Image (cartoon, grey):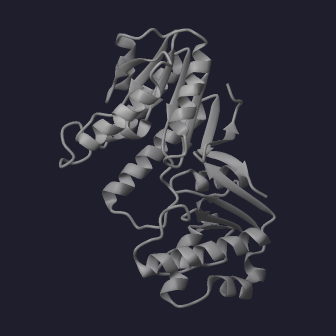
Amino acid sequence: MDLIIGGAYQGKLEYARKRYGFDDNEIYTCTEAEGISFDRKCIYKSEEFAMWCVRNVIDAVDFLEEHRAEWKDCVFICEDIFCGVVPMGADMRAWREMTGRMCSYLSSNAEHVMRVFCGLEQVLK
Amino acid sequence: MNIFISGGNKNGKSGYAQDAAVKLAAGGKLYYVATMIPYDDEDRVRIDRHIENRAGMGFETIEAGRDIQKVFDTADESGTFLVDSTTALLLNEMFPNSYSEKADSEAAKRSIAGLLEIADRAANAVFVSDYIYSDAARYDEFTEEYRSSLASIDRALAERCDTVIEVCAGNLIVHKGILP
């Protein structure tokens, strides 16, 4: 499993397409409403899965741990949402917290971790 | 040589960019391309602080709030150009008349064309942007348009420039190329 992280609009998905050769039907985009699915190679917008967890009172790390075997060969893409001020809304704070713990968990389990900055790769692990 | 600099606010990007531009100019023509159009006293104070910071460094200031490639109407291509910042340029291009009007949807495209023209024609250029992409918020449509537009400018410059630097608390993270 690999993890790609970076700020909004930095070119994370484009980077993944180039590095792994993913086409559209290999990419699953998480949503706040539907959560996550492990049947495609690339899991995009993991932060939206974390929001789904917040909305449904599910712990993202526990959920991923239960489904470990299903994502062990996947590439997760997650937006770095961790550098702003503490959000005013309780749900945004819970989202940030959930996404942060999820990223740390994914990062520690990942073989490679890359950050994308202005379209450029920075290898973190 | 072209350098693209980004990073969080108040981390020392402008200060480093000025030093880098002076070094690249090596005694030759040195231009400060001022992109900010002041709207109120707060803006004027910020501009005065920037002017004070670069006093005595040898910069000739060119005001270019929009249509940035027009710097070549007066400036010499063999010089070194410091463009600070792409953030202000984009804002001016999006709202040529007033903030209350609808944003110009061609603003990012026009900004990229102008900035890449500077990168291509100038002997040396240093571009400064702001990294505003890592906070936990659901923004309104206007803010998202601004963020995605600025990111498209950043990525075009990062691709074109020889060196890409992220400034963090005054420290330099070199993402591409070598330091001047």
Image quadrant in which the C terminus of chain B is located: top right
Relative image position of residue B15 (x, y in whole percent): 53, 33
Coordinates of residue A30 in the picture (x, y in percent): 55, 73
Say if residue A30 shows up in the picture.
no
Left or right: where B82 falls relative to B24 = left
Quarter of the view holding residue A74: bottom right
Whether residue B79 can be seen here: yes
| Location of residue B13 by image quarter | top right
Identified at 23% across, 36% down, the residue is B96
Residue A7 drawn at (x, y percent):
55, 56
- Residue at 35% x, 32% y is B48
Q: Residue furthest right?
A: A111
B159 w.r.t. B143: above or below: above
Question: In this rendering, would A48 be left or right of A112?
Answer: left
Q: Nearer the viewer, residue A14 or A93?
A: A93
In this rendered view, identify the residue nearer to me: A7 or B29: B29
As displayed, is residue A101 above or below residue B135? Answer: below
